[in-house]
Image: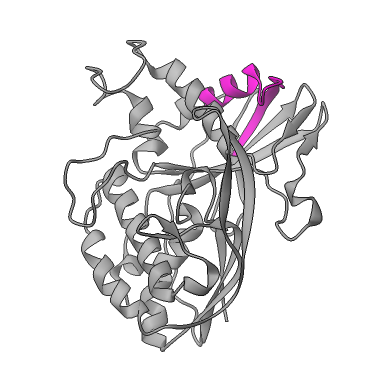
Amino acid sequence: MSALAATTPLPIARYRFSARVVDALALPPYAGSLLRGQFGAALRHLACMTRQPSCIGCPLRDTCPYPRIFEAPAPPEHALQRFSAIPNAYVVEPPSPAIEQENAQVPQVLEPGQTLAFHMVLTGNALAQLPLIIVAWERALRQGLTKNRSRAELTDVHWADTNGVLHPVWNADQPHLQAHAASLQVPLLPAATRGLVLHIYTPLRLQHQGHPLRPQQLRPRTLVSAVARRAALVLEFHAAQSQWGPQVPAITAIAEQLTDQRALHWFDWKRYSSRQQQEMTLGGVVGQWQLHGSAQALASVWPWLWLGQWLHVGKNASFGLGGYRLQCQ
């Protein structure tokens, strides 16, 4: 069994943000990119002391909370891979329609007085910045979302435990953080488990040599390697836990022993990139992916796949793609 299952609690937490809509709000079908962009702009405005156009070359870059949270610089060398950017310390999980529904490509319209709710997963050092992150979301929502600048008012923040139960952390009437267990403890694999099922609810985009892998090209090894690598890197860069990276090759090798059944299909969402001034496609696989193997093999990959429910996996995981729920058979 991977040592990850027996570790002390990991510094990872999911928060639910709720806001009251002030102006009619038409969110794009998938709002992850929009929310992340608005949050990043607000966070930079609050944290940046020099007002330089770029963090590159800034004398405060190593101590400023903005790059540490939103766009941490990559190291020049690393044992696992070469980086243009390292995994972020957060995942924005937007409200999203069920991908099986016919209206999955239709904008989500919220009227004044309705609630806009979304989640954000924070890891390691980002957890200590929760007060700043809340203020950044207040600013982003108050300034307005989408091109119409539709405003919303942040009303409360809850911590979601591993069972999905919500615990109050902050509200606008009493803006003092409540103590909470901002961590995860990986559970043991339930006895008599014969297989694992991933219910992938936002497009999972795994790539090989820069090209996305279609459903028929995916293998258990590809999935487990990507999940384990991402988890190890997030914990190393943002929680100073470098002990997990050396386990990735062994976990990847164990995944070769797994067999699978895939009920997956390709799904595209469209988004507009303000940075590139063009419409872009958020494509990946969704559906169910069953994994089978020996009890030992399943117990070895289980902790990593369980953790991936918080960290997501694949391209654009930071704004909610590659999300899944894990079920034991």
Q: Quadrant of the C terminus?
A: bottom right
| Magenta span contains residue 147 | yes
Q: Is residue 181 visible?
A: no
Q: Residue at x 48, y 27 (%)?
A: 40
Q: Is residue 154 left or right of residue 231?
A: right
How many marks do you count on the picture?
A: 0
Q: Is residue 188 above or below residue 204?
A: below
| Nearest to the observer: residue 234 or residue 31 | 31
Q: Which residues are magenta?
A: 134-159
Q: Residue at x 25, y 18 (%)?
A: 58
Q: Is residue 261 left or right of residue 30?
A: left
Estimate the x, y position of residue 183 in percent, counting from the top left. 43, 50
Q: Is residue 313 visible?
A: yes
Estimate the x, y position of residue 146 in percent, counting from the top left. 66, 26
Q: Is residue 93 left or right of residue 81?
A: right
Q: Quadrant of the N terminus?
A: bottom left
Estimate the x, y position of residue 16 in percent, counting from the top left. 60, 41
| Nearest to the observer: residue 70 or residue 82 | 82
